[in-house]
Amino acid sequence: MKFKHEDVSLKIITVAAAVIVNQHDQLLLVRKKNTQAFMQVGGKLEINEAPEITIQREILEEIGCECEIQQFVGKFETAAANEPDHLLVSYLYMVELKQQPQIAAEIAEMKWIDLNDSATLLAPLTKEVVIPWMLKQQMAGLSP
């Protein structure tokens, strides 16, 4: 599928992505092998797969955890972190893990970041959507 955006033809990647927060209000991010940017745990929807199923499958594959979806945050469009000329359409979910996360599948690195982290290279979805949403939740006195 292609998408016309500012006179440039972009291909669309549709994913489900997780917002995973620990008791210190830190955000869990992963970096996939052969990439630079840290991003939400998640991945591409398979044919006829609901995003709620995708996010649970991807969390199990990437960090070896079962999870419970707490909230559908929304559907967002950003630039893709690792694919030039691609538009990323993300179904974003607040998720609670049932086990401690462990690196698996194509994940090279995993870390918890503070929301004001300025040293970590972040994917557009994380930088433009997730962190601002989490900060807004905190300012409103809501726990993300």
Image (spheres, rainbow, N blue to C red):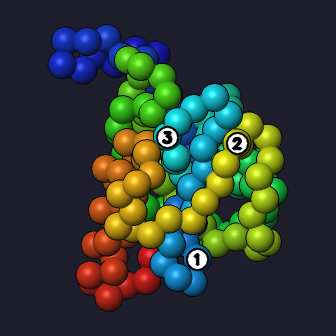
Could you tell me which residue is drawn at 36 percent across and 32 percent down?
79
Q: Amino acid at mark 1?
A: Asn
Residue 9's disc is none
- Image quadrant of residue 100? bottom right
Disc 1 versus disc 2: nearer the observer: 2
Q: Amino acid at mark 2?
A: Ala
Classify residue 59 as left or right of residue 71: right
Label 1, label 3: how far apart the Cα atoms are? 21 Å
- Image quadrant of residue 139? bottom left
Q: Amino acid at mark 3?
A: Ala
Does residue 137 lie above or below 43 as drawn?
below
Asked if residue 48 shows in the view, the reply is: no
Q: Residues within 10 Å of mark 1 (few under 14, many from 20)?
A: few
- Mark 2, secondary structure of its residue: strand
Could you tell me which residue is drawn at 35 percent across and 37 percent down?
78
Does residue 17 lie above or below 2 as drawn?
below
The residue beneath circle 2 is: 108
- Mark 1, secondary structure of its residue: loop
Does residue 9 lie above or below 136 as drawn?
above
Q: Residues within 10 Å of mark 3 (few under 14, many from 20)?
A: some
Label 3, label 2: how far apart the Cα atoms are? 11 Å
Task: Where is residue 57? Give x, y as percent.
Answer: 75, 49
Task: Where is residue 116? Give x, y as percent.
Answer: 35, 67
The residue beneath circle 1 is: 22
Could you tell me which residue is drawn at 39 percent across and 27 percent down?
87
Disc 1 versus disc 3: nearer the observer: 3
The residue beneath circle 3 is: 37
Asked if residue 118 shows in the view, the reply is: yes
Which sits earlier in the primary sequence, circle 1 or circle 2? 1
- Mark 3, secondary structure of its residue: loop
